[in-house]
Amino acid sequence: MEKNSQPTTYGVVLVTAESRALAEAIALDLVESHLAACVSLIPTHSIYSWQGKIHSEEQWQLIIKTDLAQFSLLETKIKAMHSDEVPEILAIPVVDGFQPYLQWISEQVQD
């Protein structure tokens, strides 16, 4: 499938989820929807402040490899599935990478 004429804006989107089940559901939906080429899931421990209290919790970190041109759709899908009132959804641009891998991302993430 041919991409549009705009250059791909590769990026990594970070999202945390409260459970492995939620993390896997989000990951599967994003890949099946062609909004992400790959989502890596890593168990993590987060310490954060929320509503005036310090929290210390086990969570799952999603590392989403995508074309940031799809960020708005990706963000909407994550918010609809996520259990948090204000989920972490952070886009980090990729400034360079192994070209065959970047090409693979382009092939997987579709407009």
Image: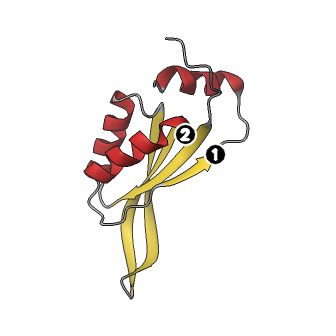
- Toward the viewer: 9 or 54? 9
User: Measured along the vertical axis of the image, is residue 11 above or below residue 104?
Assistant: below
Instruction: Indicate which disc residue 41 carries.
Output: none
> Furthest-top residue in view?
1
- Residue at 59% x, 41% y is 11
Q: Quadrant of residue 2?
A: top right
- Toward the viewer: 83 or 44? 83
Quarter occupied by the C terminus: top left
User: Measured along the vertical axis of the image, is residue 71 above or below residue 55?
Assistant: above
Q: Please, what secondary structure does the residue beneath circle 1 have?
A: strand
- Toward the viewer: 64 or 76? 76
Q: How is the image coloured?
A: secondary structure
Q: Amino acid at mark 2?
A: Leu
Instruction: Check whether the beta carbons of the residues at disc 2 and disc 1 lie within 8 A of each other.
Output: yes
Q: Quadrant of residue 16?
A: bottom left
Q: Residues within 10 Å of mark 1 (few under 14, many from 20)?
A: some
- Residue at 70% x, 25% y is 99
- Residue at 72% x, 41% y is 95
Instruction: Indicate which disc residue 68 carries.
Output: 2
Q: Please, what secondary structure does the residue beneath circle 2 have?
A: helix
Distance of label 2 from label 1 (alpha carbons): 8 Å
Image position, residue 88 (x, y; %): 43, 61
Q: Is residue 36 left or right of residue 57?
A: right
Image position, residue 53 (x, y; %): 37, 87
Image position, residue 12 (x, y; %): 56, 44
Instruction: Indicate which disc residue 93 carries.
Output: 1
Q: Is residue 67 visible?
A: no
Q: Is residue 97 left or right of residue 3?
A: right
